[in-house]
Image (cartoon, coloured by chain):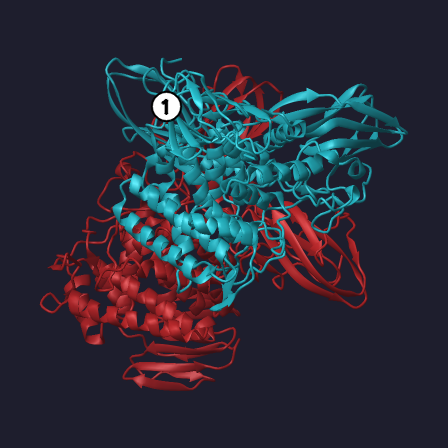
Chain colours: A cyan, B red
Amino acid sequence: MGDKQAQWIWYPGDFEIWLRREVEFRRDERGVIVPPIWRVDGPYTSVRFRKTFVTDTGETVKFSADGAMRLQVNGATPDRIPEEGIWFGKGEYALTVEVHHLTRVPSLFVQGETLVSDDSWEVSQLFFSGFVKAGKAGFTDAAVPPSDFRLETMPIEPVKIEPGDRSLFLDFGRQTFGYMQLHDIEGEGKIRLVYGESEEEANDFENCETFDELVISSKKGQEAIVQHSRALRYVRISWEEGVSIDRASLLYEYLPVEYRGSFRCSNDTMNRIWDVAAYTLHLNTREFFLDGLKRDRWVWSGDAYQSYLMNYYLFFDLPTTRRTIVALRGKDPVDHHLNTILDYSLYWFMGLKDYYLYTGDLSFIREQYGRMIGLMDYCINRTNADGMLEGQPGDWVFVDWADIEKEGELAFEQMLFCLSLETVSMFAELLGEAETVVRYHFMAGQLRGHIQNIFWDEEQEAYIHRRVNGAIDSSVTRHPNMMALLFGFLDPTKKKTVKRSVMLNPAVPAITTPYMRFYELAAMCEIGEHAYVLDEMLGYWGGMLELGATSFWEEYDPHATLSEQYAMYGRKYGKSLCHAWGASPLYLTGKYFLGVTPAKPGYEEILIRPALGGLEWMEGKVPVPAGEVALYMDTTTIRVSVPAGTGRLQFRSGRSPESIGGVLYRLEPNLYELRLDKPGHEYVVYYAAEENR
Amino acid sequence: MGDKQAQWIWYPGDFEIWLRREVEFRRDERGVIVPPIWRVDGPYTSVRFRKTFVTDTGETVKFSADGAMRLQVNGATPDRIPEEGIWFGKGEYALTVEVHHLTRVPSLFVQGETLVSDDSWEVSQLFFSGFVKAGKAGFTDAAVPPSDFRLETMPIEPVKIEPGDRSLFLDFGRQTFGYMQLHDIEGEGKIRLVYGESEEEANDFENCETFDELVISSKKGQEAIVQHSRALRYVRISWEEGVSIDRASLLYEYLPVEYRGSFRCSNDTMNRIWDVAAYTLHLNTREFFLDGLKRDRWVWSGDAYQSYLMNYYLFFDLPTTRRTIVALRGKDPVDHHLNTILDYSLYWFMGLKDYYLYTGDLSFIREQYGRMIGLMDYCINRTNADGMLEGQPGDWVFVDWADIEKEGELAFEQMLFCLSLETVSMFAELLGEAETVVRYHFMAGQLRGHIQNIFWDEEQEAYIHRRVNGAIDSSVTRHPNMMALLFGFLDPTKKKTVKRSVMLNPAVPAITTPYMRFYELAAMCEIGEHAYVLDEMLGYWGGMLELGATSFWEEYDPHATLSEQYAMYGRKYGKSLCHAWGASPLYLTGKYFLGVTPAKPGYEEILIRPALGGLEWMEGKVPVPAGEVALYMDTTTIRVSVPAGTGRLQFRSGRSPESIGGVLYRLEPNLYELRLDKPGHEYVVYYAAEENR
């Protein structure tokens, strides 16, 4: 082994695209594979790596490839590459290595003393195309190429076992995921496993969403691991006469992540909500941020966008974030929107903006820049004469599972599009692409004007829903208004107006999906309605807990009975009971209660604006690149520390506050700021909470 | 089994593209896989078939797929599909079947009584993309899906065996191809096989192009078949001490085709040339028309274009022609020229024109129409301000392995481009695409003008080679002039001029590759120089025979010694000794000596203009869709019959000819025509040959 650390390299994006293909083709409903409804990309099947290598002393270099390999040294091909490596005497060498594989990621591992595979190598997908920096993700074991990537597993036991007549009924105590293991099987015959996220489903073979059937033949004491991973809390295992099974367990499959964020408060229900939300997000944080565990397990851009934000307040897991962003974008050419959904292309840009804001990692943005421009050009090519996006043939205009009109120019979509244009323009500026800045900046400005002039309705004091074929449809929905609150489409006066005219107006149809509640409740926090949001969380997420939820659901109707809760998509157990977008309390508590946000990219400056929202006390941590921000707050005391950089603590106080070892500034009547200049130092503030804040 | 014949169906083009990928990744040089130098396409990994099905009586339908299958009947998914099929009662059904496979062609086989898989089914590659007619190629066995397609094999024995010390040297008597089989192996150790198209190569392990090494372990009487197919006449098999081999043979691999064309004449050397050419073409007519047997075995558009034409005079094998055309075009988007070569994109259009001319099959043209327009638009997007094609970065301007300039606007390339534009315009007209006709017709006309005005040099009485950066390079090469003779860029007067000023002018550099000799000799025939062409064939191809060729070569220099003949590309045995483009005598004899050409598409009218070119007599057959045209000719008698349609025999006679049962017309002094109105009837003409014709 050499001195330097080698790692597997490939064409950038190919590992992520390969992995997505593996994951998305695992969707199996009642024994039938359901392929994705979008174009399925694969890695390039043959690529060419290159590197110029100079050695003054000579060294031996080992080459391994996942795929057929063709090494050329200064244009000549050695017959074969000995396992013990090739000796390169003092000199300069132009190396090229072609690697080809049809189903895995063609990838390369080179280990010498000074020459190792890393992103100083370049790679092209074609002889005649340009070379780019090789892709990598930290696979440093020569024996484990990227296509051997697997999540971790560990055995877990059921908490309750009900033996029956040739059957076992298992309860794992809470929502979980993995591969069932059957122990001490004897005899010959068929075994059936019926999975349930609910007890009802596991006992209803005719209507369950997933099951497995195994045919085993007599080997005394045989053990079997079911091939497919499943989402479950319950499983009914039954078998034919002539078979016997002693016991069963689960090989729990998971991504190892660290729970860096935390939240505890005076309300126990809220604490349980946070715990279950954290577990829900963890279960859906896998090869990628998935939508839900049971059903499709595909990668959806709109769902992932929310997972990114929750993740910044819990795991701060950047590899999964990057994998998801890269995989979602897929290969060129773009010939449909991400997931075929108009809004889902736009969330992709917004996700990049957040990534930069929370991490400060401009190098990843640089790597994605070309693909960003490519997707934006695809969108721009589909705008109408007014530069606005409306659904074209083949587009799915999703917005929400809600009974809203989707034809024509939706205010909601124009806002996302405007934010996307502004994002690309911002990155172009950061990367010194002046011409691109001008182009997109102009388009974004024009669109902001249209949004204001066309969709703002003075009479209703709200953004209206849409315009169709040039005619205003003046119905009001929450969707554009909550986006307007969140993303700066309203001045402070109008913010207050919209709160009354839309957000707290019962005449405007309510939001019913946790997916859109994410934005709705964030928007309410933006206008200072923390107490309202806390009540909603306790009611809505607390409502699921009361029905026995051990992870949060795809959809929840507080007015329906328990047995009605499981159906969706016209199927009795169609609803996913462990859905990433159900975990938004993580985001709401972290961003708006603990109140931690990056004031500068990568938390170089940390803004902390805590709000109790009616809680007696709360404490928690928020991960940032350098460590965790820690905060404790009750109605009279705030304790806070930042791990690096500088922080600004802003809080409201009914009296003139005091601080030990810190200087307080008054920003407005009752609004104060404490500068946190000493990383690691715990600042303490004595103050008096305003009512209901 | 039902009454109707089902066959495997897939997304059109996917079988051919899959097969090409299989074939092109077999290139192995001294144990190292050499991947193609162009983008390697694969089939769509998941596709969706659909069909509306009405039954009045009810029927049972069996479904098989190559890949994961998801059937939907009126929108519902049955749990599983029983092997014995699904019963459909009287009624109407909307069927969709999704099929997914990562490495093979996702394909479907449906067998009912009236419902069968055929091209009345439609297929899309995406949920949201358009449906097109399913692809098929006559695979009617449910147990053999298209991805099981293999060529035929049969064992052949060496004609000479030289046993040595732990070795065998085999000679199969002539060039051949297949998998070596070792019989009665005993012991443990390594066996090496060194292949040679020449005896020298098989005895030169250090420099040979291909070898195999097997490690065997002692099983008495074991038999081994080498994994790789190889081109060879000779093979040196040697083994380590402790191993013994009794004998070896070859599993000859071939495409079963019928030799429908034939040619015999008064010159024995010419007869041998024709036989060896036919065998050469057959060896290279495989999954596709390949370039050569030994080396890359890739599919090259320029090479294939000549094979198509030879094939029309020997096998008239249309499936291989279609497979090759479809595979060469590959998937969208077009992001480089076919094989990365500028001229090779253009030959693709010309090949389609010939396909239509020789077969009359407009339905295949219709299927290719969209891809034709796509490739043409790619070419047009790369034209310069004058609408001409010159090499862009990434383009390979090939023309020929000859020492000619390739930068700038080559007259040769503009001629091919003009013919391509005219071809697309013609097909657009036939398919009723009026706007496309106008567009391409205009561009072709403009280009014809440029070719005449820019490249014709009155002083030299020749097309000059090129223009670079607006400056004329007035050097003269044969290449544009022979294309001009063949493809109507010269009026009759100029034809005679160019014959003298270029074709018979020793000051213009000679053509050295059989590849370009194809066009050169065809051009000479076009201007009536059959005797010259016969001499050239006897000299050039006869020269290879004198050196012991059993198939024709990639390149031949009559002035080099035998040992110098094998080298090419800087490698001692780099030259392919069995190269398709070496078989052009098939085309020259069929088209210009027997003189048979389609006067209307699909030989609806057959033109026969035989020419002895100095031979005492000749006879032969030329395949046409309905059978064979048969012709015998000596200096006083012509006997001819056509299998269908009408024919016109045109011949020169020094005296007034006579015919039994036919009416003769005099077209010009000494040029006569006999109408062949009775299919199957042998017409006999008595005439007097003009000298040297």
- The answer to whether residue A167 of the structure is visible from this angle is yes
Q: Residue furthest front?
A: A655
Residue occupied by mark 1: A645
Residue A450 lies, in percent from the top left, at 40, 60
Q: Height in image: A186 above or below B181? A: above
Q: Residue furthest left?
A: B459
- Mark 1 crowdedness (10 Å alpha carbons): few <14, some 14-19, many ≥20: some
Position of the C terminus of chain B, as image quadrant, is bottom left
> Residue A417: x percent and y percent?
43, 52
Residue B1, horizontal then vertical, whole percent: 76, 56
Relative to B58, say whether B582 is above or below.
above
Label 1: chain letter: A
Number of numbered markers? 1
From the viewer's side, name the closer residue of A249 and B530.
A249
Front-lying residue, A218 or A671: A671
Three-letter amino acid code at the position of disc 1: Gly
Q: Residue at x 68, y 47 (%)?
A: B143
- Residue A5 figure quarter: top left
Frontmost residue, B105 versus B27:
B105
* Residue B494 position in % (x across, y down): 18, 72
- Position above or below: A570 against A466: above
Helix, strand or loop at label 1? It is loop
Left or right: residue A680 versus residue A410 is left
